[in-house]
């Protein structure tokens, strides 16, 4: 064996060791073994035996070439496989057909793998689009929340710095230190925003005085109006006692036609 032949055989053996031939069919294994031995597929057992003898002399552990034992193990595996698969005589045509079938199978396998990859790619693309859509929705939601938060923050800042001004006092409940006033604030037009404020926290003495004066005036007018209405007792018909000329007493309601003299007052 020359140096080039040895180097090529080592390279083929290294490649052979990297492949998992356990998953290959017998024909595929035989093809790989022919390749390692640098023989044409379909070579006879005699040709295989001669080639193995040459390689064995060089790669055998007892030889003085210091080659790794792994090379001889691969060569021994090729011997075992081809002893079963190699024809008794050269049959290159049959093995060429095997090679054709091998490449057809490899082509179909590759196409199937491409189809699977396309399906996987399509699924990944769909998942990516769905994820992007969800992310866009999340981004839109986050932006909306940030915008709303900004508005609320601005409003809160304004409320913190704004001086509340009493525009009008609407009502009162309680008395003394427990009195509370219903306040209408300037700039707040919604009646729901009117609030009851304890008298101790009302810092508007002028408005309080005006409200109390107006309230007192209304109470005075109300009392006068109540006095002007006659009571049920005064509305009843009064009985007038009169003295008849003859000295007998009869009510004005009497049907007598005598001259009457009033001696009493109407009772109210």
Image: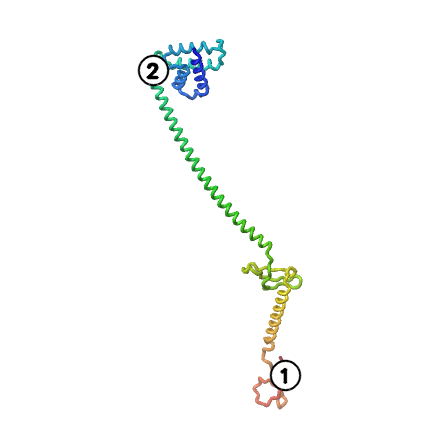
Mark sitting earlier along the chain (1/2): 2
Assign a secondary structure to mark 1. loop
For the point 54% across and 49% down, the residue is: 150
Q: Which residue sits furthest right? A: 177
Rendered view: 209 above or below 4:
below
Q: SS at mark 2?
A: helix
Image location (x, y in percent) of residue 156: 57, 52
Measure the C-alpha gap from mark 1 to mark 2.
Answer: 159 Å
Residue holding disc 2: 92
Q: Are marks 1 and 2 in contact (CB under 8 Å)?
A: no
Q: Name the quarter where the C terminus is drawn.
A: bottom right
Residue 60 is left or right of residue 201, and the answer is: left
Q: Residues within 10 Å of mark 1 (few under 14, many from 20)?
A: few
Residue 210 spot, x, y in % from top left: 62, 67
- State the image quarter where residue 240 is shown: bottom right
Q: Which residue is mark 1?
A: 265
Q: In the drawing, does residue 96 fall left or right of residue 167?
A: left
Q: Nearer the viewer, residue 139 or 247?
A: 139
- In the foreground, 187 or 180: 187
Tag count in the figure? 2
Looking at the picture, does residue 242 appear above or below residue 217?
below
Residue 3, position in %: x, y?
Answer: 44, 12
**Left or right of 45 on screen, residue 135:** right
Q: Which residue is at 34% across, 15% downward? A: 92
Name the image quarter holding the N terminus: top left
């Amino acid at each position: 064996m020359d140096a080039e032949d040895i180097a090529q055989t080592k390279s083929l053996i290294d490649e052979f060791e990297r492949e998992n031939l356990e998953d290959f069919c017998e024909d595929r294994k035989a093809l790989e073994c022919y390749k390692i031995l640098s023989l044409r597929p379909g070579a006879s057992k005699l040709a295989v035996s001669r080639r193995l003898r040459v390689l064995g002399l060089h790669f055998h552990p007892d030889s003085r070439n210091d080659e790794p034992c792994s090379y001889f193990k691969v060569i021994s595996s090729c011997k075992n496989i081809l002893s079963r698969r190699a024809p008794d005589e050269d049959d290159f045509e049959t093995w060429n057909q095997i090679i054709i079938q091998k490449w057809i199978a490899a082509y179909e396998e590759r196409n199937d793998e491409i189809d699977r990859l396309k399906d996987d790619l399509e699924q990944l693309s769909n998942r990516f689009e769905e994820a992007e859509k969800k992310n866009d929705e999340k981004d839109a939601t986050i932006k909306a929340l940030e915008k709303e938060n900004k508005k609320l923050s601005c409003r809160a800042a304004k409320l913190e710095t704004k001086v509340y001004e009493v525009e009008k006092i609407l009502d009162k409940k309680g008395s003394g230190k427990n009195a509370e006033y219903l306040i209408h604030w300037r700039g707040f037009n919604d009646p729901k925003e009117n609030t009851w404020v304890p008298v101790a926290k009302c810092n508007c003495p002028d408005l309080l005085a005006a409200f109390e004066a107006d309230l007192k005036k209304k109470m005075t007018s109300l009392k006068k109006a109540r006095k002007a209405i006659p009571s049920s007792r005064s509305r009843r018909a009064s009985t007038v006692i009169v003295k008849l000329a003859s000295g007998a007493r009869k009510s004005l309601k009497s049907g007598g036609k005598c001259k009457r003299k009033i001696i009493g007052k109407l009772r109210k």
